Image: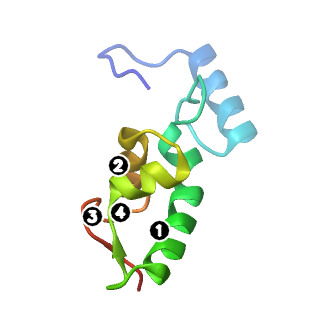
Amino acid sequence: MRYSKRPITSSALNKMMKKFEATGSLASCQSGSPSTATVVAPTVEQTVQSMSVVATHGECNAREVSRWTEVSYGSVWRALQITLRRYSYKLQHN
Protein backbone atom coordinates (compact mmCIF):
# COMPACT_ATOMS: atom_id res chain seq x y z
CA MET A 1 0.00 0.00 0.00
CA ARG A 2 1.38 3.40 -0.99
CA TYR A 3 1.09 6.49 1.16
CA SER A 4 1.01 9.96 -0.38
CA LYS A 5 -0.16 13.42 0.55
CA ARG A 6 -2.83 13.45 -2.13
CA PRO A 7 -6.34 12.25 -1.35
CA ILE A 8 -7.26 8.77 -2.54
CA THR A 9 -9.16 8.59 -5.81
CA SER A 10 -12.47 6.81 -6.19
CA SER A 11 -11.00 4.27 -8.62
CA ALA A 12 -8.20 3.42 -6.17
CA LEU A 13 -10.74 3.04 -3.37
CA ASN A 14 -12.88 0.76 -5.56
CA LYS A 15 -9.83 -1.40 -6.35
CA MET A 16 -8.99 -1.69 -2.67
CA MET A 17 -12.57 -2.63 -1.80
CA LYS A 18 -12.69 -5.31 -4.52
CA LYS A 19 -9.37 -6.73 -3.39
CA PHE A 20 -10.49 -6.84 0.24
CA GLU A 21 -13.76 -8.55 -0.69
CA ALA A 22 -11.93 -11.12 -2.79
CA THR A 23 -9.05 -11.93 -0.44
CA GLY A 24 -10.05 -10.60 2.98
CA SER A 25 -6.85 -8.58 3.15
CA LEU A 26 -5.19 -5.56 1.59
CA ALA A 27 -1.71 -7.09 1.76
CA SER A 28 -0.01 -7.63 -1.56
CA CYS A 29 0.26 -11.15 -2.90
CA GLN A 30 3.68 -12.75 -2.88
CA SER A 31 4.89 -13.67 -6.32
CA GLY A 32 7.24 -16.53 -7.09
CA SER A 33 7.79 -19.88 -5.49
CA PRO A 34 7.51 -20.49 -1.74
CA SER A 35 10.69 -20.31 0.31
CA THR A 36 12.74 -23.46 0.59
CA ALA A 37 12.68 -23.22 4.39
CA THR A 38 8.90 -23.64 4.55
CA VAL A 39 8.92 -26.52 2.04
CA VAL A 40 11.76 -28.39 3.78
CA ALA A 41 10.63 -27.73 7.38
CA PRO A 42 8.37 -30.82 7.81
CA THR A 43 11.09 -33.14 6.49
CA VAL A 44 13.70 -31.53 8.73
CA GLU A 45 11.43 -31.79 11.79
CA GLN A 46 10.75 -35.49 11.19
CA THR A 47 14.45 -36.18 10.67
CA VAL A 48 15.41 -34.32 13.86
CA GLN A 49 12.89 -36.34 15.86
CA SER A 50 13.99 -39.69 14.44
CA MET A 51 17.71 -38.88 14.80
CA SER A 52 17.38 -37.65 18.37
CA VAL A 53 15.56 -40.83 19.40
CA VAL A 54 18.41 -42.92 17.98
CA ALA A 55 21.24 -40.68 19.31
CA THR A 56 22.89 -41.52 22.62
CA HIS A 57 22.13 -38.22 24.35
CA GLY A 58 19.01 -37.46 22.35
CA GLU A 59 20.59 -34.68 20.31
CA CYS A 60 21.89 -34.02 16.81
CA ASN A 61 22.97 -30.99 14.78
CA ALA A 62 22.07 -29.27 11.52
CA ARG A 63 24.98 -30.75 9.57
CA GLU A 64 23.88 -34.28 10.44
CA VAL A 65 20.30 -33.46 9.45
CA SER A 66 21.64 -32.05 6.18
CA ARG A 67 23.50 -35.27 5.43
CA TRP A 68 20.51 -37.48 6.27
CA THR A 69 17.97 -35.49 4.24
CA GLU A 70 20.35 -34.63 1.38
CA VAL A 71 19.22 -31.01 1.63
CA SER A 72 21.82 -28.26 1.69
CA TYR A 73 23.08 -27.12 5.09
CA GLY A 74 21.88 -23.57 4.42
CA SER A 75 18.33 -24.72 3.71
CA VAL A 76 18.29 -26.89 6.84
CA TRP A 77 19.66 -23.99 8.90
CA ARG A 78 17.00 -21.58 7.57
CA ALA A 79 14.24 -24.13 8.19
CA LEU A 80 15.39 -24.63 11.77
CA GLN A 81 16.04 -20.99 12.63
CA ILE A 82 13.25 -19.21 10.80
CA THR A 83 10.42 -21.69 10.35
CA LEU A 84 10.82 -24.07 13.30
CA ARG A 85 12.46 -21.55 15.69
CA ARG A 86 15.08 -23.99 16.97
CA TYR A 87 18.82 -23.66 17.52
CA SER A 88 20.60 -25.30 14.62
CA TYR A 89 23.75 -26.31 16.50
CA LYS A 90 22.15 -28.45 19.23
CA LEU A 91 18.81 -30.08 18.57
CA GLN A 92 17.14 -32.05 21.30
CA HIS A 93 13.94 -34.00 21.06
CA ASN A 94 11.41 -32.69 23.58
Task: Estimate the x, y position of residue 68 in percent, counting from the top left.
Answer: 51, 54
Q: Which residue is mark 1?
A: 48
* Position of residue 87 in the picture relative to residue 65 (left or right): left
Label 2 or label 1, whichever lies nearer to me, is 1
Calculate the distance from the C-alpha at mark 4 to the C-alpha at mark 2: 10 Å
* Position of residue 21 in the picture relative to residue 16 (left or right): right
- Tell which circle, 2 or 1, labels the residue nearer the N-terminal end: 1
Instruction: Kindly state the secondary structure of the residue where label 1 is placed.
Output: helix
Q: Which residue is mark 2?
A: 77
Task: Estimate the x, y position of residue 79 in percent, counting from the top left.
Answer: 43, 51
Evaluate if marks 3 and 4 touch, with contact meaning CB atoms under 8 Å apart. no
* Quadrant of the image containing the C terminus: bottom left
Vertical placement of 40 versus 46: above or below?
above
Q: Which residue is mark 3?
A: 87
Asked where in the image residue 60 lies, by quadrant, the reply is bottom left
Vertical placement of 92 versus 2: above or below?
below
**Residue type pointed to by label 2:** Trp
**Residue type pointed to by label 4:** Arg
Q: Residues within 10 Å of mark 3 (few under 14, many from 20)?
A: some
Vertical placement of 45 versus 21: above or below?
below
From the viewer's side, name the closer residue of 15 and 43: 43
- Tell which circle, 3 or 2, labels the residue nearer the N-terminal end: 2
Calculate the distance from the C-alpha at mark 3 to the C-alpha at mark 4: 7 Å
Calculate the distance from the C-alpha at mark 3 to the C-alpha at mark 2: 9 Å
Instruction: Kindly state the secondary structure of the residue where label 3 is placed.
Output: loop
Q: Which residue is mark 4?
A: 85
From the viewer's side, name the closer residue of 33 and 80: 80
Residue occupying the point 36% across, 84% down:
56
Label 3 or label 4, whichever lies nearer to me, is 3
Residue occupying the point 39% across, 21% down:
2
- Tell which circle, 4 or 2, labels the residue nearer the N-terminal end: 2
